[in-house]
Image: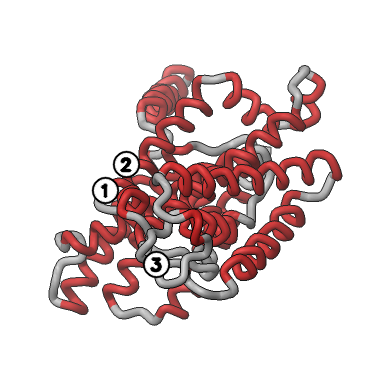
Amino acid sequence: MSNVKMSTQQPRASRQPLFSLLQGRLPKDTGIFIVMLGIALIFEVAGWYVRDQSFLLNTNRLVLIVLQVAIIGIIAVGVTQVIITTGIDLSSGSLIALTAVVAASLAQTSDSLSPMFPSLVDLPAVVPIVAGIGVGILCGLINGVLITRTGIPPFIATLGMMVSARGLAQYYTQGNPISFLSDGFTAIGQGAMPVVIFLVVAVIFHIALKHTRYGKYVYAIGGNMTSARVSGINVNKYLVIVYTIAGGLAGLAGVVLAARVSTGQSSMGMSYELDAIAAAVIGGSSLMGGVGRITGTLIGAVILGLIKSGFTFVGVDAYVQDIIKGIIIVAAVSIDMHRNRKKR
């Protein structure tokens, strides 16, 4: 009898190490990458069925997807770090508008019919770029200080910044677009430059989160803020840094977007903050804090780009797209909550 028992238990014991070994060898973002491939294949099949043409083999469509992903991705890199600390940033979309109009106003040429600053035309491209990013950094710094010094929840602090930044952008431009931008400035938004900028940003912060003291502290704060304080981490300092970085990256995204479309408008960046949050959550970042990867966020941003372009390709109404996007966000958060409950 004992021999029989041993023989029936043997396969179970041998299978477990093998499964664990395979699981350990697979990259952490394999699951979400497979989801991305599945979505792409679904739209490829739907394209032949509905439009009688390929979804993936259209060069112009793929370029458009990549460019959309680049702008959202730059913001999402900053938002991911905020989410890891158990925070949230609702202001990034409005910061895009504010930084875009500030940068555009300083990038106008003497050919402009009505420049905002007649004495500040034909400036070197570095001036509007630095000004736009600087405004984003300042707004992010304000977010961080409000959250750490006053105890205001991140949701409320960044919601206030979202409303204020959009209002400032409208007041700054009086609702008028800012055009006639210099070639030196618009060059950073043309061709593959937005994608290059996004990838450089992603690599920098992937390394920062994975291999530096900054990254270790950010994960520690998100994992357990009280324990992080007890262990000697200056939690307030690093929270301010995280929100400042998020603001600076939103400013960079605003500058790149203004350069890409060769204009600055106060309506830019509408709902971009939700897309950035969705990209981070779909990519595996936990709203409970302490979990998140830049590589996952990158894949999440690509998934959103595929979904948006795919639905447009097969003829789904734009309003229906927003409904589906909302369902996807809720589903991703629900999965995250379920995963955290199982861990507890």
Q: Residue at x 59, y 73 (%)?
A: 174
Q: Residue at x 45, y 79 (%)?
A: 320
Amino acid identity at mark 2:
Val
Badge 2: residue crowd in 10 Å (few <14, some 14–19, many ≥20): few
What residue did someone put label 1 on?
192
Between marks 3 and 2, how big is the CA–CA gap? 30 Å
**Residue highlighted by disc 2:** 196
Please state which of residues 71 and 18 is positioned toward the viewer in this rendering.
71
Mark 3: which amino acid?
Answer: Ser
Q: Is residue 253 visible?
A: yes
Q: Earlier in the sequence, mark 3 or mark 1?
A: 3
Q: Nearer the viewer, residue 208 or 284?
A: 208
Residue 112 has which mark? 3
Q: Pick the residue in front: 190 or 314.
A: 190
The C terminus lies in quadrant: top right
When asked about the image quadrant of residue 171, the answer is bottom right
255 is higher (above) or lower (below) than 26: below
Q: In percent of the image, x 38 and y 61: which residue is there?
A: 110
Q: How is the image coloured?
A: secondary structure
